[in-house]
Amino acid sequence: MRLGTVRREGGGTQAFRQNGGTTTYFDVPDAGALLERSDWSSLSGKQGPEPLPEELAPPITRPGKFVCAGLNYFDHAREVGKNAPAYPTLFAKTTNTLLGARDDIQLPEREQSTRVDWEAELVIVIGMTVRNAAADAAAKAILGYTAMNDVSVRDWQKRTEEWFQGKNFDATSPVGPFIVTADEIDPAEGLSVQCLVNGSLMQSGRTDDMIFSCRELVAYISQFMTLEPGDLIATGTPAGVGAGRTPQEFLKPGDELITRIEGVGELRNFCR
Amino acid sequence: MRLGTVRREGGGTQAFRQNGGTTTYFDVPDAGALLERSDWSSLSGKQGPEPLPEELAPPITRPGKFVCAGLNYFDHAREVGKNAPAYPTLFAKTTNTLLGARDDIQLPEREQSTRVDWEAELVIVIGMTVRNAAADAAAKAILGYTAMNDVSVRDWQKRTEEWFQGKNFDATSPVGPFIVTADEIDPAEGLSVQCLVNGSLMQSGRTDDMIFSCRELVAYISQFMTLEPGDLIATGTPAGVGAGRTPQEFLKPGDELITRIEGVGELRNFCR
């Protein structure tokens, strides 16, 4: 099953569900609001045509929490010269950053930064309230998955000890195209994660290279915070980021960024 | 003027405004929802008795963003052995952490951590949408101030490069008691910031010792993100944290934590 959010003419947004060939629309503003209903998977709505990619908003437009794991692929940790860490490295993303699957990425002004980098990532969508979850409960709390590009402003990320400011520029993080439920895909089996810039393959990893698996991340985070339906957890990026290349490469106006995760779908965003 | 949020029997919350001796209640769930109305300062509501401290919820129960500055007092930077930084160090707090002015602080289980520390802080409340604000616009965007204790789980904070996990344990951050509007107090004049544990004065700083002033923080953060009404910015803590003392001291069950900011008010929370 797929869940997502479309933009409507006039400025509103609306949640949808896809099951088999049928698309059903609901009078709630996003897939997050749909997930607050325990009967979301069987709820009646209004059938309609499949949404166009250009109409897609982030599936969850205002997540209660958006926790991101850094340094979570063995190959990316090697690329940035770090050992595999003992604990997940975590930071947060705020809603001002979020874009739909085809929205333009807003690069910082040239005088602010020219070191804007890509990070294709699988994102976990929480479907159940959990705290102190053991592995089984953590697995059950995962409703599904979506894709993101955690576009990062490297010099701002490194200005201080904390990455937050380089990760939270307005309109830099495309998310989507929709949520695919966990019965359809399993990251432990190794889904391909790819990032292309102007057609060139920059990142090509597999989700079974994660240092902390999806259920391990959910279990770990739930040791200190209650996770709730609609919360998002980004799972880190594989090797091939621009700052890790020789010579380094960064995004510039006009570049097309494609983020592709096997079984989840594709984001296609131009930089402006 | 003061703005705040009270808990009602049956589980709901309600915003209030205090002006002179009059308390007015509104049918919106928190002061954040009240601030979404441009006429919040003159809006009619229902007059009622002054709220009891025990009834207070965090003034803004679900802030759109809660950005926190670390290492922002000269005396605290010295205490932790750092030079004054060139840029503000920023991280985020999530809503699961927030408590009212008299709520109990939920310490981690003993086997999780016994290194739980205090950080009394002044918090800026944004009243206007701003991006790329110059100093004047940044000052105008500040609606008012509230207090917080950014109770921090030090060993989790230091597990990785990112502080996020040590700063976001459930039910650890009392905020309030209410918002005091910026026409009544000016942190640039040096408001006293104090933290007491079981009656002993642990922190005693002044807001004019901040490395980045309130308006500088707003201006800086607005360079990368759009700030909106109800967003919160914590401004860092002065010297005297438990980890900086010899010997180190940490919070334990039964401790009473008082957080007091001149002109803003007092938080009084027991640890359990």
Image (cartoon, coloured by chain):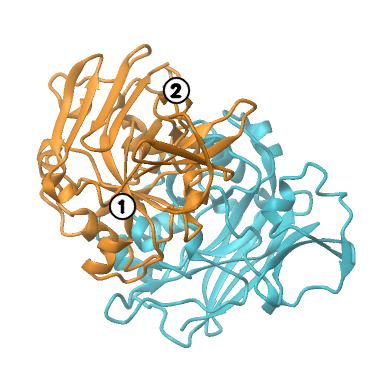
Chain colours: A cyan, B orange
Q: Position of residue B122 (x, y in %)?
A: 27, 42
Which amino acid does the dot numbered 2 rest on? Glu
Q: Position of residue A211 (x, y in %)?
A: 50, 46
Label 1 sits on a secondary structure element that is strand
> Marks 1 and 2: same chain?
yes
- In front: B10, or A126? B10
Residue A78, quarter of the rendered image: bottom left
Q: Residue furthest top?
A: B254
Label 2 sits on a secondary structure element that is helix
Label 2 marks which chain's residue? Answer: B
Which residue lies under the disc numbered 1? B90
Quarter of the image for the C terminus of chain B: give it. top left
Q: Is residue A55 above or below residue B179?
A: below
Label 1 marks which chain's residue? Answer: B
Left/right placement of residue A47 relative to residue B267 reads: right
Residue B81, quarter of the rendered image: top left
